[in-house]
Image (cartoon, grey):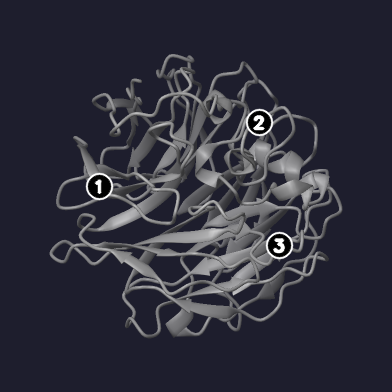
Amino acid sequence: MIKMRKLRTLFTAPSIPVPPGAINLIARKNRFHVGIVFTALLVGMFLWPWDIISQAQVACSSPSFSAATSFAAGAGARSIAAADFNRDGKLDLAVANGQASSVSILLGDGTGGFGAKTDIPVGAGPRVVVTDFNRDGKLDLAVANFVSNTVSILLGDGLGGFGAKTDFSMTQPGLSTVADFNLDGKLDLAVVTAVPGANVAILLGDGMGGFGATTYFGNSAASTAAVTIGVGDFNRDGKPDLVAGGGMNMPPNTNNTSVLLGDGMGGFGPPAYFTLGQNNAALAIGDFNGDGASDLAATNAMGTTVPATLEVLLGDGTSGFSERTIFPNVGLNAFGIAAGDFNRDGKLDLVHVSGQPSSSVSVQLGDGRGGFGERTVFPLAVSGVQKVEVGDFNRDGRVDIAVPSPNSGNVSILLNTCSQ
């Protein structure tokens, strides 16, 4: 029987394989409403055969990836999401381009390659997430435009195309995440924002691609400004909760991660803070020690001269966390992070990227007890990378890596060559 933690990923839908980066965000014993379950599969989606590989399969002793192959996106390529936009069973990519104010759609060929990009105009400073907002079985886009102060919703046609955007006003929206926060079977949106008095904005979906009035939660004091967001069930009550990561360039004692517990009606309680290191840049959520509770992993970008750290907080299932465990010297300017089983041993591993002075991808294998080994570094021939996505791009049952480069305007694909 497949372990439940291998089936969990940021909201996945039945029959759609679960993507690695979202592992364990919620499907625990169907605690969440079917809307949440149906969602997430739509958030990562349609292509993760690796997730159902037999537990008896022999694991690789170390991670191994091919040299990166690059595909053109747009100027300032930064935010990225993988999903099957044309429903052909092959993973595609959506890449938000900060300088071009566009989202590039690259359709996958199922062998690790991608066709020529199609650019969709959006607002300035975009970040993209994927799901099915209007419940028609076709994937849609939500794009938070930080500079334009809007969130754009683009409904998919199921063929790889998208309709005209519908904009919702919001002050400096940043990263976003999707879940059914009021348990009505319709997907909602949570967005990091700079609104005074709050740092998380909630837009409840109507199931047709529209949203109600925005509500705000959290605390936007300068010392706790969030730059990243994730969703999980941290107290295991079947209601989705939020975690908002601390901001950049703040003193260590004020750079906290906040957890906001959901009430199952679209509301959230006051934030509870957990200290991470200085300059927390990215978060990943997963069950790293196999106890059924959601854990946190974070990278702390310390600049181009001081090595960054990886920090892990193990959840206790009652919304609390252990003292952080610090894994030092994980590269310079470590930013984006994601979780996946890269050596196929049934234990979650971590991948993160370093952007400067030269870019690279680092993989640290998990021991299944909340610990991680030394990093294995894979160089990139680009610079300034800040995000990473994972998926089985060539459908060989192994988890691959995609990294957008804002300086080069392309996406680097590293295919997993782990062999038994």
Mark 2 / mark 1, whichever is N-terminal: 2
Tell me the amino acid under the disc marked 2: Met
Quadrant of the frame with the C terminus: top left
Q: Which residue is mark 3?
A: 236
Q: Which residue is mark 1?
A: 375
- Name the spot of residue 386 as percent of width and height, x first: 34, 50
In the image, is 94 to the left or to the right of 60?
right
How many numbered dots are placed on residues in this image?
3
Q: Which residue is mark 2?
A: 1
Tell me the amino acid under the disc marked 3: Arg
Residue at image point 61% right, 78% down: 218
Query: Under tag 2, what secondary structure?
Result: loop
- Name the spot of residue 413 as percent of width and height, x first: 34, 29
State how far apart marks 3 and 2 are (Cα).
22 Å
- CB contact under 8 Å: marks 2 and 1: no
Give the number of the mark in front: 3 or 2: 2
- Name the spot of residue 54 as percent of width and height, x first: 55, 24
Residue at image point 63% right, 66% down: 317
Mark 3 / mark 2, whichever is N-terminal: 2
The answer to whether residue 186 of the structure is visible from this angle is yes
Quadrant of the frame with the N terminus: top right
Mark 1 / mark 3, whichever is N-terminal: 3
**73 w.r.t. 191: above or below:** above
Query: Foreground: 139 or 149?
Result: 139
Query: Under tag 3, what secondary structure?
Result: loop
State how far apart marks 1 and 3 are (Cα).
32 Å
Residue 42 image-quadrant placement:
top right
Q: Which mark is residue 28?
A: none
Give the number of the mark in front: 2 or 1: 2
